[in-house]
């Protein structure tokens, strides 16, 4: 019993240590994947976390402050930060429990309930420990983490009203400005657009597609080389440097303080929903066009136009 309690205490300490900000989370996920390459979700999480950091820094860049109020900028930042923090707070203990189980060659997932982990994903970890089905576990983690952020982030009254139903979020979603990018050190960009971000089912489908792209045999080595050789700063210069662009804007730790989060008592989101089991099927297909370098240049110009339009509308409404 004492051994079990010490494991739980250690996991809580390590989770708090690495859940400081977007940079520390990204680094943790990547290093974890290097130690445990069978846990593919960890690499996916590191790359998606990088994208969250780039989006956070954009809010303090050249264009967004011209279109959004300080309150709106804070709300958008806190949405990214809270989702990022919540997923890590839930996923990191799972990942560490697996390492304990792997090291001792017996499952310790029964401790997961004391760490507030959903029964759904604990069952999936148990299955993985027996079968070694890497694809199923990755999909299960995608499903779990998107459900985990549903109540504290997607349905939170402030984020729902001030962010997800704001005019700016609507045009961002409509024009696919929110795109998850996987860069290479050759200056190439690949990725997929986030559409209908408010819907859990659509976020899960996107996660499956991103996983399929990230581990595609044609691209994986290039993505991994970028991630291993490029320390995350939160700025888009992390990948634009390979596109021969000049540095624009500051790094994440230069513009944002550390945020102290608090979480109320956790409630298990899983109640035996049949639809969830159906989602475990890896039934997604990738679009024909995955290279986004040209698209990126075009959309970066379009977002500037959209921001200027938003700025004009704001000015008119204040007259």
Image: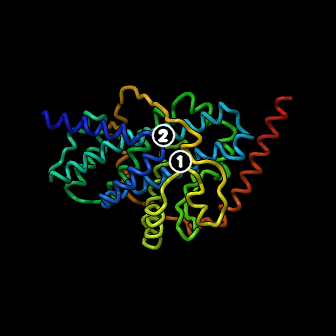
Q: Position of residue 163 (x, y in %)?
A: 61, 36
Q: Is residue 243 above or below residue 52?
A: below
Which of the image's four quarters has the N terminus? top left
Q: Is residue 100 above or below residue 190?
A: above
Furthest residue to the right?
319
Give me the residue at 55% from left, 27% from top.
157
Q: Are marks 2 and 1 in contact (CB under 8 Å)?
A: yes
Q: Is residue 151 above or below residue 136?
A: above
Which of the image's four quarters has the C terminus? top right
How crowded pointer 2 is (Cα within 10 Å; few <14, some 14-19, many 20+) is rated as many
Check residue 52 in the rendering and tell me which mark sits there, or answer none: 1
Of mark 2 and mark 1, the one earlier in the sequence is: 1
How crowded pointer 1 is (Cα within 10 Å; few <14, some 14-19, many 20+) is rated as many
Left or right position of 306 against 32 = right
Task: Please state which of residues 40 and 233 is positioned toward the viewer in this rendering.
Answer: 233
Q: Quadrant of residue 117?
A: top left
Give me the residue at 71% from left, 61% from top.
298
């Amino acid at each position: 019993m004492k051994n079990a309690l010490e494991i739980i205490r250690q996991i809580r300490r390590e989770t708090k240590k690495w859940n400081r900000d977007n940079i520390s989370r990204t680094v943790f996920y990547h290093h974890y994947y290097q130690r445990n390459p069978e846990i593919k979700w960890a690499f996916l999480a590191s790359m998606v976390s990088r994208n969250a950091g780039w989006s956070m820094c954009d809010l303090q860049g050249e264009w967004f402050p011209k279109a959004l109020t300080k309150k709106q900028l804070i709300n958008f930042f806190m949405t990214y930060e809270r989702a990022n923090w919540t997923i890590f707070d839930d996923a990191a203990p799972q990942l560490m429990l697996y390492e304990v189980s792997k090291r001792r060659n017996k499952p310790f997932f029964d401790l997961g309930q004391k760490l507030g982990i959903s029964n759904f994903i604990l069952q999936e970890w148990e299955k993985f420990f027996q079968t070694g089905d890497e694809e199923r576990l990755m999909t299960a983690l995608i499903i779990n983490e998107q459900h985990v952020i549903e109540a504290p982030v997607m349905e939170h009254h402030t984020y729902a009203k001030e962010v997800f139903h704001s005019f700016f979020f609507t045009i961002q979603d409509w024009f696919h400005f929110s795109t998850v990018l996987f860069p290479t050190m050759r200056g190439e960009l690949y990725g997929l657009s986030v559409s209908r971000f408010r819907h859990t089912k659509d976020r899960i489908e996107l996660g499956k597609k991103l996983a399929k792209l990230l581990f595609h045999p044609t691209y994986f080595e290039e993505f991994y080389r970028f991630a291993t050789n490029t320390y995350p700063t939160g700025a888009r210069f992390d990948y634009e440097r390979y596109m021969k662009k000049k540095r624009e804007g500051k790094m994440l730790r230069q513009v944002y303080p550390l945020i102290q989060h608090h979480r109320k008592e956790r409630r298990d989101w899983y109640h035996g929903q049949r639809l969830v089991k159906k989602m475990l099927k890896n039934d997604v297909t990738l679009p024909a066009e995955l290279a986004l370098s040209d698209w990126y240049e075009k959309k970066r110009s379009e977002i500037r136009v959209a921001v200027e339009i938003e700025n004009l509308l704001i000015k008119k409404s204040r007259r």
